[in-house]
Amino acid sequence: MSASDSSMTSSAGFWREVRDVAESSVASAVATGSDALVFAGLMTLLVPPLTAGWSAALAALVGGVIHFGLSRWWVFRRFDAPVARSAFLYFGMSWAAAAAHGLLVGYLTASLAPGWAWILSKGVLWVGWTYPMSRLVVFNAAGDGSGSDE
């Protein structure tokens, strides 16, 4: 491989990563919008013992279903990966995120309004958990032995 081939490969990888981050951000925004509507609805209808933390966790699960579909078929274009494998990994990640989100929102509501706690928790979890796990584990082409990058 020549130096120019290596540079082109690096450039293509960089732009693919930029595309993945941008598309994942859009997918997350759509899923988070759905999540927010469910959270707001549950908080409006708050029936004890449904707390802000439980409302956030349930709403995150709804957003997770939407995010899975968009991430698998649009963002990471994993048409070749078995759906069961992707779903198993994604929903494990999603359940962990939902639990963390519920706990973090529950904790943060001691000092913030539930809406602000929800927003802060969403941002922290997307940057530190959801995107990295989606990219590197759940929808990683190398992880299923296919060798496909698209």
Image: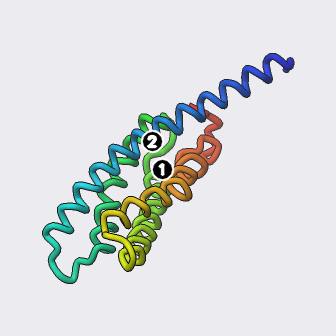
Q: Tell me the crowding category of disc 1: few under 14, some 14 to 19, or many 20 or more residues within 10 angstroms, Cα based.
A: many
Q: Is residue 15 above or below residue 5?
A: below
Coloration of the structure image: rainbow
Say which of 143 and 69 sits in front. 69
User: Which residue is drawn at the image coordinates 43% and 63% (left, top)?
Assistant: 121
As drawn, is 100 to the left or to the right of 66? right
Q: CA distance from mark 1 to mark 2?
A: 19 Å
Looking at the image, is mark 1 or mark 2 earlier in the sequence?
Answer: 2
Using the rendered view, name the quadrant where residue 62 is placed: bottom left
Q: Is residue 40 above or below residue 48?
A: above
> Residue 129: x percent and y percent?
53, 58
As drawn, is 26 to the left or to the right of 142? left
Q: Is residue 65 above or below residue 100?
A: above
> Residue 19: x percent and y percent?
53, 31
Identify the image quadrant of the C terminus.
top right
What SS does tag 2 mark?
Answer: helix
As drawn, is 115 to the left or to the right of 23? left
User: Which residue is drawn at the image coordinates 31% and 69% (left, top)?
Assistant: 114
> Residue 77: x percent and y percent?
48, 34
Using the rendered view, name the quadrant where residue 95 is placed: bottom left
Task: Please identify the residue farthest to the right as the structure is shown.
Answer: 2
Q: Tell me the crowding category of disc 2: few under 14, some 14 to 19, or many 20 or more residues within 10 angstroms, Cα based.
A: some
Q: Which mark is residue 25?
A: 2
Using the rendered view, name the quadrant where residue 64 is placed: bottom left
Say which of 59 and 137 sits in front. 59
